[in-house]
Image (spheres, helix red, strand yellow):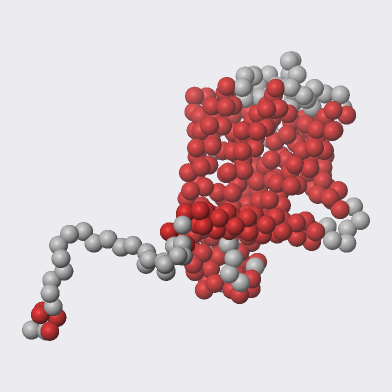
Amino acid sequence: MSHLADAPAPAAGPVTTSPPPAPHGEPNHAADPSRLARRSRAQTKVRWELLRNLVRKDLKVKYKGSSLGFAWSLANPMLLLVVYTFVFQVVLKSGIPRFGIYLMSGMLIWNAFSGSVSSACGSVVANANLVKKVRFPLAVLPLSAVGFAAVHFLLQLLVLFAVILGLGYHLLGPNLLLLLPAGAVALVFTIAMSLLVSALNVRYRDTSHLLDVALLAWFWLNPMVYAFGLIQNQLGEWTWVYLLNPMAVVIISFQRAIYDAPANNSTGKSAILAHDGYGFYLEHLAIAGAISAVLLLIGMRVFRTMQADFAEDL
């Protein structure tokens, strides 16, 4: 038998471990909760500063050397506004009064979402050299894309408000309060999708191409260039399935908050807005928020699991 067999058996009872005692007169920092809390706060502060600096850098690079600066960010939505207004109000005659306001009230938040997810998808790959050489919280890369798009969205929203008030249409009222829960749901859903696609794109490079196709199809699934009543007429009692799409719920909530639909419209049997009251939107925003929260947990888990192999996959 081995000499280990002659060793005395350990005493019975539970085995406990404890941190090594500190030298006499010195505090045990390993077991000091206040020290751990301060360290956690310091790390959180560093992450926020890094995220803020990345967003600021992206904004400076975007408009470096440009004489018009942020005004160029309005060119794309304004061009879409002119084209879609001509097609759906002049040629096809959708029958939606003030179509430009109806379109932009939904399209601005959609552009913020699609722009964030598209940029976040390639954020890790685009910073491959940085990822390989520097140790930092990698989640700030896709999150910086979300922050960049959020700044654009807020500024564009202010411009839209100015246009609406300049045209003399009603805007101010309790309806604007819907922007808060709708914006919160949009933010959570955008972060969830950004984390998910940015991690998957590192290992599976076809993710970016599939995302482009998905976003194109997804655009037409949201009621922006047509009235929501068309969906209700086609789906009937199955409309709730359509409203499981968080972005559709966010868009109709933004439309209810911003677009002041006339009492009499020419859409026939199709209503322009999903519902007149606020309870309908709050109920579906709660469901969309729950879906977004689950996707956020999935996105965070996938990102944390795959980030250990980012340097190797890149």
Residue 113: percent from the left, percent from the top?
A: 65, 46
Residue 291: percent from the left, percent from the top?
A: 50, 39
Q: Residue at x 68, y 51 (%)?
A: 147
**How many callouts does the rendering have?**
0
Q: Residue at x 56, y 38 (%)?
A: 246
**Does residue 182 show up?**
yes
User: Residue 25 or 36: which is nearer the viewer?
Assistant: 25
Q: Which residue is drawn at 38% across and 66% down?
A: 21
Which quadrant of the figure contains the N terminus?
bottom left
Check the image and name the residue furthest to the left. Answer: 1
Residue 72 higher or lower than 236, as above or below:
below
Residue 45: percent from the left, percent from the top?
A: 63, 55
Q: In which quarter of the image is residue 24?
A: bottom left
Q: In the shown orientation, is residue 88 left or right of residue 196? A: right
Q: In which quarter of the image is residue 53?
A: bottom right
Q: Quadrant of residue 181?
A: top right
Residue 288: percent from the left, percent from the top?
A: 53, 36
Which quadrant of the figure contains the C terminus?
bottom right
Q: Residue at x 87, y 27 (%)?
A: 167
User: Residue 129 or 72: which is nearer the viewer?
Assistant: 129
